[in-house]
Amino acid sequence: MNQTTETLINATINGKAISAPEYLSVIQALWHAGYPRIKSVGCLEGVCGTCRVLVRRQNSQNITTELGCQVLIEEGMQVNFLAFPTPAQQHYKLEDIRNSWEVQNNFHTIFPEAENCRHCGGCNTTCPKGINVEKGVILAAKGRFREAGDLFTECVLCDLCQSACPENIAPNHVGIFSRRVTAHLHTRPSNLINRLERLRKGELKVVI
Amino acid sequence: MTNNISYQEALANYKAVAERPLPEVNYEGLLEKYHPDYFKDACVQLKIGPNKGDICHIQLAEMLQADARIDEADLAGAQVIETDILIIGGGGAGCAAALTAAETGARVLIATKLRLGDSNTVMAEGGVQVSIEKDDTPQQHYDDTLRSADRSVDKTLVAEMVMSAPDVIRWLIQQGMQFDLDEYGDLLTRKAGGTTAPRVVYFRDYTGLEMMRVLKEAVRSSEIEVLDYVPTVELLSDEDGHCTGAVLSSLEDNRYKLVKAKSVIIATGGIGRLHLNGFPTSNHFGATGDGLVLAYRLGAKLRDLDSFQYHPSGLAYPQHLSGTLITEGVRSAGAYLLNAQGERFVDELQSRDKVAAAIMRECAEGRGVDAGNGIKGIWIDTPGLELKNPGIFNARFPKLIKIGKKSSIDPRKQPLLIYPTLHYQNGGVIINKHGQTNIPGLYCVGEVSGGIHGRNRLMGNSLLEIISFGRRAGIHAAKYSPRKPFRKVTIEHLSRLRRELMLADMPMDPKGPILFPAYAKFETDSDYSGLHKNIKSK
């Protein structure tokens, strides 16, 4: 525990040879080595989805997609930060969906590509949160929005699944749409509604 | 230097027990002796600006009294954009203001330093305070907020906020936000430290993530225009002192953009990344207090500049996760705090300032855990909570389980080492109930504003505040902006700033806002076309 000498790890980040202590994330390691990094840095806790990296570990043929703040530096690791162009997004208003019978048709108008899923699994492979993205898309296409949305509980909208999809489906937005429409049309808590009614009737006041 | 007890020895002292009695705790003089707000030499008097003579944290004072990054010559040939309402900052408060204003048909532009949604909102875990339980009232919510604030607050702002809370939740649900519900579909509530009733509604320990991705999606799928990667470096004003827009600096093409706006809403959040007093922070990478600096220069009055919140439960070990937040929800669910001897030393649901100070006292008096490399802390007894309430971590705190995986520590089996982390700026720009500042045309909402939390904020009041006041500013600005004519845009106020700096014999070399923490090496950036450099060639 009380280590006095630090082990330095050698890795390549964005083509630069970096040596840094083993307990640093790849972002921290880049800073540690004196390189600037501002873009692709966000919450540093794995919830904002900004710091997308491609990672190849020593003696591995595989390239994985991960979040840079969550990856600890390893010997021989190669890391490349991915730029973050914000892709064009679907335009819709939840208010335009008048009742729950209309959701499915609205969904296919907003996300016409969703029913073209080829089941290639690319979205699942790229997801740094291990979400079963493909199943979510299929559920949403069948109108099972609550079930689809539940799968996306951990989604941080990093857009990696979108980059991976050969049909240009925006699976993460399908997921968030599913979650939103479920709350919008079905969350009706009685304790909240009772309180709103008492406030409307002027029964509750604050004395300063 | 006090010798604390080593990690291994402290771990050997620890035993998971479901119930532990609370010992006698002495709170007398606790804050004065151990809370960082009271550290000697932490504060100075401001020498220039609307708060001249007021006490302010020394690191914040340096920024408030810094020179601007630009001068007249920089504006020549800059691209000009016109909009009704400019919103600076793309977190929860900014998005709430934007969505509300856009509903009325006003033209809205959000300019954000990083990407839309990169904010402290997305990291918030605990929840939102709203009095909805049968035996709870807005009055109790108001009273709790004032008691915990430990100093005069703006009572009107607090009253407005607590009364609007239920409608805030309704609005969030309408936007598509999910909350944890009980088997009958009612909102589940939990109790925050320093409160008299269970009042925090939440979604797992992802409340902020759920809120932010819903608001972000709502903004992106609307007509609202969003500019990413454009930090605001200065506000614009006319000869009457109205705020008339802002100067943005693009991280993409190294150029300035000049936005002419009829109203400007600042929603830039807090200042954790200044690492006040050398503390780690739970804050987002962009939280460098830009809005405070911009507003102060234009003449906006600030308050409570010596008061910050240190969240009691920042992860202390392992080092790469230092400062990461462990939600107060864990304590509110019943987890104890234990010192290196395995004993409780504070009522875990006291207000955050007292709990944080009590942790620092344990470590200062040798009852803390020493994890080497200068890392110290005390235990949060997660295995005890799991014992008392099996399965609770999987069901309610998935993010904590993930943190455990990254630490190679299973919080259900081994306690986590925590130490207070810089979390929140209690004060800020003075506003009225519409979010208006004393500068015509300038609004401030969210953490950048002050007056609601006094010296100590309650859990769940910040997510409430950002939506409550974000919506107010959006409504107000939309009502009064579109019909107004555009005004003249100048940076005349910078002449005043520079004159004042000179007269006060202040240095002109620090430039503000700093935009990014020093360790990101923004000013020496060579990797991509960065911002206009302020390093003058000598």
Image (cartoon, coloured by chain):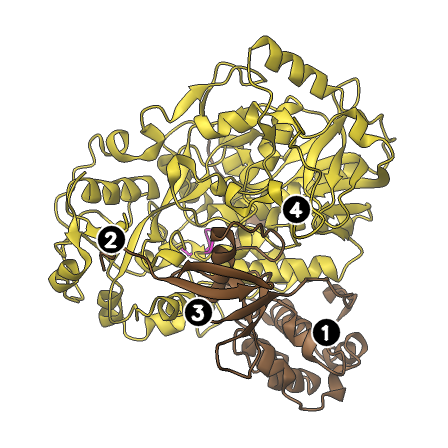
Chain colours: A brown, B yellow
Instruction: Determine the CA span between mark 4 and mark 2.
Output: 37 Å
Q: Chain of mark 1?
A: A
Q: Of callouts 4 and 2, which one flags the residue occurring earlier in the amino acid sequence? A: 4
Q: Position of residue B92 (x, y in %)?
A: 60, 51
Q: Residues within 10 Å of mark 4 (few under 14, many from 20)?
A: many
Q: Chain of mark 3?
A: A
Disc 4 marks which residue?
B113
Q: Secondary structure at mark 2?
A: loop
Residue B437: quadrant of the picture: top right
The disc at residue B372 is: 2
The lab-note entry on whether marks 2 and 3 share a chain reads no
A58 relative position to B191: left or right: right
Q: Secondary structure at mark 3?
A: loop
Q: Of callouts 3 and 1, which one flags the residue occurring earlier in the amino acid sequence? A: 3
As displayed, is residue B109 above or below residue B33?
A: below
Q: Nearer the viewer, mark 2 or mark 3?
A: 3
Disc 1 marks which residue?
A99
For the N terminus of chain B, the image quarter is top left
